[in-house]
């Protein structure tokens, strides 16, 4: 396979730290000044605005049976069924709290996309899984959705569980794969051989679920360029509909369980860039379409179709087909977007339980977007999802003159233009084919909060 020549400039640009813009302003700008009262007001406005309000719903199940050492998720490691059952009772009460809020305003909230994430929701046994489904059915939540997805840990699923998922109406399975090397799997404490994943993907499973996603991680300890390319080739062999190619974030200061991984060799920046580029080339040559920063999808998958017709959106859960502008969430640490408000639920399970017991939305922080944030969010989403920004579109929507409003930004973009990352005309910004590796770097130019000299620690793409 031909590899692109990697100049020093390419490597240093690609490795620049910065946010992934699953929200703008990013989580680090959210504050505790946003709580249950502000979230209630945003929901009230949302309910008043629409005859039939429509949103996506994220459900966070925080438990996992074992600690994966690379994990950056909000997970609770426990196999205590009493604790899990108690949590499911609270989750049901939170669903009741949210949907009765709309009912009291004579609005039937329609949910058009459901995502069951975690933690590890495939760890749920039948009784627990059905309890969540019944909690949804009380409010007719499973009656009119476009997509219903679940995160799957290959070590905790079985053909039987796939039967429950199919009966529940789940349409998309998202497998946490990370790496197929046995050595890497052992070190990261997630042993799930290729043969296990292969045996799970039976013709029935492929037929019954319209989309199968694999999450892959590069930059893990013990990974080498060759070992990672071997993983990528195995992914191609298993042929998922979508692939999310994420970079491992090593943050042992805040994720203590990652400390053990510091004792193993990790790929350097140059090797990580080569891994990303090689994976990207292998996937695209095999027929997947490169989407946004780090997603790949087969052309017939709903994500590729939405990218093609311009409806794809950036959200907390990555790139999505854009079923809805608003995303509600239940469960600890769930994040929500309602109109111009972002909110996030409490981290601690005890505090979460207490808030629900008091009949309060368990919101611990958030961000109320000013007009400037909304303008910049639209520009950033347009770069990430459409590789292009039309000045007219932004001018029409916000009644501004793009070039006046973004004078500093346009000046800064000329440096990226000189590097061949984008083309700047009198009417728009267009990301070049080469520039698609540097989307976050373009977005950073429009991030007002970075102007305060702030430095992000997460590197990219
Ligand atoms: S299963 Fe997922 S959420 Fe749970 S510890 Fe592993 S990576 Fe983290």
Image (cartoon, rainbow, N blue to C red):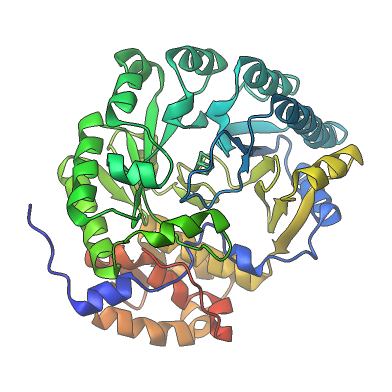
Q: Residue furthest left?
A: 2
Q: Find residue 414 and report its image quarter.
A: bottom left
Q: Is residue 30 above or below residue 327?
A: below
- Image coordinates of residue 232 in percent, x first then y, are 23, 43
Would residue 401 be found to the left or right of residue 15 on screen?
A: right
Q: Which residue, as the protein is rendered here, is positioned at the far right? A: 358
Could you tell whether 203 is left or right of 451 in the image? left
Total count of labels = 0
Quarter of the figure with residue 123: top right
Residue drawn 52% across the image and 70% down it: 395
The picture places residue 209, in percent across and down from the top left corner, at: 41, 22
Q: Residue 156, relative to residue 61: is it above or below? A: above
Q: Is residue 227 left or right of residue 51?
A: left
Percent across and percent down for residue 45 are 79, 50
Q: Is residue 415 above or below residue 345?
A: below
- Which sits in the foreground, 194 or 46? 194
Residue at the image point whose x is 58% and y is 39% from the top:
118
Residue 65 position in % (x across, y down): 57, 33
Residue at (29, 39) in percent of width and height: 182
* Residue at (53, 51) in percent of width and height: 315
Residue 310 visible in this rendered orientation of the protein:
yes
Query: In this view of the protein, can residue 309 be seen by the observer?
Result: no
């Amino acid at each position: 396979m031909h590899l692109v020549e990697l100049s020093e400039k390419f490597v240093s640009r690609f490795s620049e730290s910065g946010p992934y813009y699953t929200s703008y302003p990013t989580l680090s700008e959210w504050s505790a000044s946003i709580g249950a009262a502000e979230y209630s007001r945003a929901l009230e406005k949302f309910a008043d605005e629409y005859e039939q309000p429509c949103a996506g719903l994220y459900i966070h199940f925080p438990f996992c049976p074992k600690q994966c050492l690379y994990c950056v998720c909000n997970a609770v490691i426990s196999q205590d069924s009493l604790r899990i059952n108690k949590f499911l009772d609270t989750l049901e009460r939170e669903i009741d709290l949210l949907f009765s809020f709309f009912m009291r305003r004579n609005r039937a909230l329609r949910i058009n996309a459901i995502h069951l994430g975690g933690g590890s929701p495939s760890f749920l046994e039948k009784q627990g899984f059905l309890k969540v489904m019944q909690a949804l059915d009380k409010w007719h939540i499973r009656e009119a959705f476009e997509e219903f997805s679940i995160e799957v840990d290959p070590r905790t699923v079985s053909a039987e569980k796939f039967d429950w998922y199919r009966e529940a109406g789940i349409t998309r399975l998202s497998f946490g794969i990370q790496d197929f090397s046995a050595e890497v799997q052992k070190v990261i404490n997630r042993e799930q051989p290729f043969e296990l994943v292969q045996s799970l993907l039976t013709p029935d499973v492929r037929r019954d679920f319209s989309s199968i996603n694999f999450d892959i991680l590069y930059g893990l300890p013990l990974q080498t360029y060759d070992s990672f390319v071997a993983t990528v080739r195995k992914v191609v062999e298993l042929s998922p509909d979508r692939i999310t190619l994420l970079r491992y974030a090593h943050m042992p200061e805040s994720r203590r369980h990652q400390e053990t991984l510091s004792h193993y060799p990790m790929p350097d920046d140059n090797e990580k860039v080569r891994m990303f580029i090689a994976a990207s080339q292998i996937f695209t040559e095999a027929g997947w379409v490169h989407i946004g920063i780090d997603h790949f999808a087969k052309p017939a998958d709903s994500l590729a179709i939405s990218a093609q017709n311009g409806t794809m959106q950036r959200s907390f859960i990555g790139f999505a087909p854009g079923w809805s502008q608003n995303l509600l969430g239940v469960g600890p640490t769930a994040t929500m977007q309602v109109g111009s408000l972002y909110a996030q639920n409490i981290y601690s399970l005890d505090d979460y339980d207490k808030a629900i017991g008091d009949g309060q939305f368990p919101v611990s922080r958030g961000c109320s977007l000013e007009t400037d944030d909304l303008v910049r969010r639209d520009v950033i989403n347009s770069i990430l999802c459409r590789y292009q920004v039309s000045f007219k579109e932004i001018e029409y929507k916000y009644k501004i003159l793009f070039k006046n409003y973004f004078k500093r930004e346009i000046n800064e973009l000329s440096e990226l233009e000189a590097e061949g990352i984008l083309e700047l005309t009198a009417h728009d910004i267009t990301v070049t084919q080469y520039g698609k590796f540097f989307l976050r770097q373009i977005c950073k130019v429009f991030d007002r909060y970075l102007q305060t000299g702030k430095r992000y620690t997460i590197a990219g793409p």
